[in-house]
Amino acid sequence: MPSFTSPDQGDDLEACVLRFSDLDLKDTRLINPSSGLKAELDVSTKKKYSFAKKKAFALFVKTKEVPARPFECKEKWWKCCQQLFRDRISIHRHVATQHADEICHQTASVLKQLAVTPNTSKSLKSEDSRNPLKEYFTYNREVSAWLPDISCFSPDELISSQGSDGGEVLLYYCYRDLEDPHWVCAWQTALCQHLSLTGKVRIATEGINGTVGGSKLATRLYVEVMLSCPLFKDYMCEDDFKTSKGGACCFPELRVGVFEEIVPMGISPNKISYKKPGIHLSPGEFHKEVEEFLSQANEEQNDTILLDCRNFYESKIGRFQGCLAPDIRKFSYFPSYIDKNLELFREKKVLMYCTGGIRCERGSAYLKAKGVCKEVFQLKGGIHKYLEEFPDGFYKGKLFVFDERYALSYNSDIVSECSYCGAPWDQYKLCSTPQCRQLILACPACQRQGFTACCVTCQDKGRRLALSPTQSSFKEECECTARRPRIPSELPQQVRLPVSPRPRPGVGEHRPCSRERQQQDFPRPSQS
């Protein structure tokens, strides 16, 4: 735990201090600062307001630390808002002038929490005596105490192999109850900066979900730290970290934050808990189940559904043979999809899968809670682990990923097509129209003809914008998305999605595009 002094050394402050590391400096959902904040708080909390604000400020500055360059007399610098600060005074001045609202938000959040949390030292010590892990962390709350020693490595060793050839991307999650997610947020921010990692890490009271990229040395050190941390070492093993070629270049920045859910299903973990998921199947066990399922595919009374829990633009370029792939744009639509099509799952055995397994944890828990399925199973480790073991198995096509790579390739199958001409194609690009947040499947031949937008409407917008650059009335999201039903309803004959690739047109042949193909839309990747 950090050492500090306070103008008030009362027992109630001792309890309060243990919560100061819970500061989340990126939570935009907190209450707005106001001059009447102190008036809203009880007397016991009022006198700690100034102290809480100082700690919020100090922790914010701490998360901005970066290693100084070699041969500099200082050991650390600070980086914030794409600016580098070489002395403490300058970073303090920057934070005070540019991030005052964030500091105030966090101070308000902590004090609001304290106002409704019992904080007598007696009850706290009693709880600590029953929880050795919490007692251990009470004396080791400094973020720096949980960073690896990299003094034996030069800065170049940590960053020299961040390209896609020599770098690596880690994908992992861990469901376990966290009492102080804000401290974990500060620690993860410092850890990733310490190792020059980029990516996204979501933290909640239900656990942690991360995708980070950097050099292989940096990712190896990251895994070692995670597996040695008392918070996670009994809940994770090395096999829980999925790896792929990549690096820090796969992410534009580092984003670490505290949320209600580590994967956004849109339902409070208090209502649907990760603690009641479906039965986990290893890749080998899942492979056998799919094999049996496909062998009975033509039987009228097949009682099994192979369910893809991902978004439509993910399953568009790769999926298991014979799967049911919901035409939804966000995982937060999944519960409504289940509700709308509940009869489809009645008395069925459901085999669920997703990219890395995290969406199936709570998705299967939601489906089980409905009480209509015969059995609910999920693929442990997701498609990622399955393809490591069965690259030429029943999964065909590419694996969509939420970073600048867009997809990983394990086999040569192409299961999607150009949205304009229908030729086999599975390489996403962003729509060429500014302000559009869609992904497009357009083959090289169509791109050469100028078809570089996600739909005809958006293509016309791009032309108008080119003629009138000052025009700013374009929607951020493409209009063609509105034509897609938010929650699709499945018909019996639509349950299974074919995966056989369509034949490519003959040489010189370029089929005219249908209006339906022109209006297909592919949204920019988002795990929401």
Image (spheres, rainbow, N blue to C red):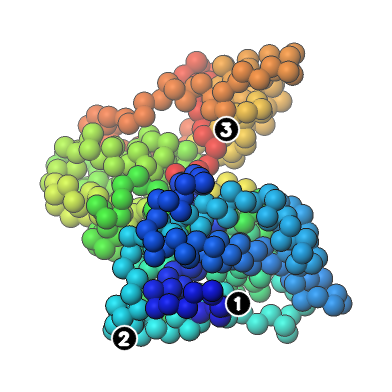
Looking at the rendered structure, the secondary structure element under dot 1 is helix
From mark 2 to mark 3, how far is it between C-alphas?
52 Å
Nearer the observer, 394 or 384: 384
**Residue at the disc numbered 1:** 144
Badge 3 or badge 1: first in the primary sequence: 1
Res. 161 image quadrant: bottom right
Mark 2 or 3, which is nearer the eye? 2
The amino acid type of the residue labelled 2 equals Ser
For residue 52, above or below residue 485: below
Q: Is residue 33 left or right of residue 303?
A: right
Disc marking residue 437:
3
In terms of depth relative to the viewer, which is nearer, 292 or 246? 246
- Locate the C terminus by quadrant: top left
Circles 1 and 2 in contact, beta carbons < 8 Å: no
Identify the secondary structure beneath mark 2: helix
Question: Which label is found at residue 129?
Answer: 2
Q: Amino acid at mark 3?
A: Arg
Q: Is residue 329 left or right of residue 371?
A: right
